[in-house]
Amino acid sequence: MITEKWAHLDAAMVASSRKTIKELFAEDPDRAGKFTLEAAGWMLDYSKNRIDREVMKELFALARESNLETEIERMFTGEKINATENRAVLHTALRNCEKDAKVVVDGKDVMPDVRAVLEAMGDFSDSVRKGTWKGYTGKKIKYIVNIGIGGSDLGPVMANLALKPYSKRNLKFHFVSNVDSTHLAETLREVKAAETLFIVASKTFTTQETMSNAEAARSWLIEKLGSKDAVAKHFVAVSTAAGEVAAFGIDTKNMFGFWDWVGGRYSLPSAIGLSLMIAVGRKNYARMLKGYWKMDRHFRSAKLERNLPVVLALLGILYSNGYGAESYCVLPYDQYLARFPAYLQQMDMESNGKSVDRDGNPVECLTGPIEWGEPGTNGQHAFYQLIHQGTRLIPCDFIGCCRTHNPIGDLHDKLMANLFAQTEALAFGKTAEECRAEGVDEKLVPFKTFEGNRPTNTLLCDELNPETFGALVALYEHKIFVQGIIWNIYSFDQWGVQLGKVLAKGVLDDLTADKPSMRHDSSTNQLIARYRKAIGR
Ligand code: G6Q
């Protein structure tokens, strides 16, 4: 089975290595149109890749051999595909905009609960935005502080920036995640207690960082406003754990729920997006969900050959497993998407950073790539050198928006010119002959030559708005899903984050105890001893 499946990749590699991207364009002037797809407001031009029809045919065969179409249905219909946690994976239900849609998990249709939470979030957001939600002293809310980490932070942070043109500017948003007290302290310097709403966002409500920050914020608020009664007016929770929320002291009337079938890193369109809904309002939030849903429908129904997430995933497989590319770069040419690479980093690396297959055996291929990136054009002046002339192959996704929300002179033309030019330079490079023809000194020719043949995808939308934004996030979610299926790994658990958490508890005991156990290795013991000495403990 494995051999048959990967035989398609071998065949794809043979076909892919025959010609360079430059040669492929030279022999087919209409190539761009042949390798371009459109869905949910996004155009994907994937013609600047080391592919032709034959390569793609083998890659689609690889996907079919992996039962991709069946697996997509298993996810959308609520099967427990997150087998190591015995959970369904249904972030798609959160944005299912189909009227009267039913999605059944364990014999229960989850859609009424999804709609009810959205409604409650909408009412609450309205009250904060309109100023009818009053703080303990009767003042309106001006500052919103989301306290969460990982999946309960990265999505809200990223989306809050992405949709800033739609946000209510007189509300100020802050995100506290790190257990480094500096993060909370610096945030509290920026806000006034009587006008601050804390959203404690935690699926489990037991995460060390979030609970420590939430408790510290609660103490700060009580001290500033002089009464424990203030907590009810200044703290709300987003969680799946009502008991823990109540134990913390937040009235569960002010809790917005979600469910165990929403993975942390896929939870932005759940109640975890509450801070975003307060920022942009329920209508724009609904538009974002619609964008997600458009991409979901496309992913579920389009033929593999016309399917954007599938094509992106297969190209990634070609470079990872065929060419051994270790990393993958996402380069948004839009300042509003500045945090998108960091968000994707978690989504991709926590989902597919696995070395054991679904049968519990070591995988026999490279799995999730190292994902990274920065907004353009900044990256051009930093790390693009390595992408253009380094020894590693780094496939890149360039993301651009044709219209800007902030037209100033010709800045946007310049931004987009850089995006398009980079993909051109990476694909076609510059030969030694071209350098010589330009009169480059012979000694410098090797240094000024660009090999080219560097693969890129370009994603373009007319405008970054709530809909195209939602569709973009869903595009990458599904791409990552497809790759997990082909690698035969479980993409929706994250056991790899557990060990460090457990050990940190033991180390914390030794940092704080009167008589530390010092039962660690000599390096860890030395670090603990040095720390204790430095702080006089
Ligand atoms: C995401 C992970 C992880 C999680 C955080 C926060 O998929 O599970 O990043 O989101 O550890 O967890 P809580 O929301 O439970 O605090």
Image (cartoon, helix red, strand yellow):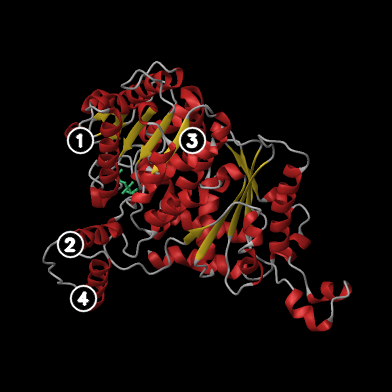
| Label 2 – label 4 distance at C-alpha | 13 Å
Badge 1: how crowded within 10 Å, few (<14), some, or many (20+)?
A: some
Question: Disc 4, ligand 1: is the CB inside 8 Å?
Answer: no
Quadrant location of the C terminus in the rendered image: bottom left
Compared with residue 464, is residue 387 higher up or lower down, i.e. above or below?
Answer: below
SS of the residue at dot 2?
helix
Q: Which mark is residue 114?
A: none
Question: Disc 1, ligand 1: is the CB inside 8 Å?
Answer: no
Q: Which residue is mark 2?
A: 506
Q: Residue at 46% across / 46% down in the picture?
A: 478
Q: Which residue is mark 1?
A: 248
| Label 3 – label 2 distance at C-alpha | 42 Å
SS of the residue at dot 4?
loop
Please tell me which of labels 3 and 2 falls first in the chain. 3
Compared with residue 290, is residue 521 higher up or lower down, i.e. above or below?
Answer: below
Q: Amino acid at mark 1?
A: Phe
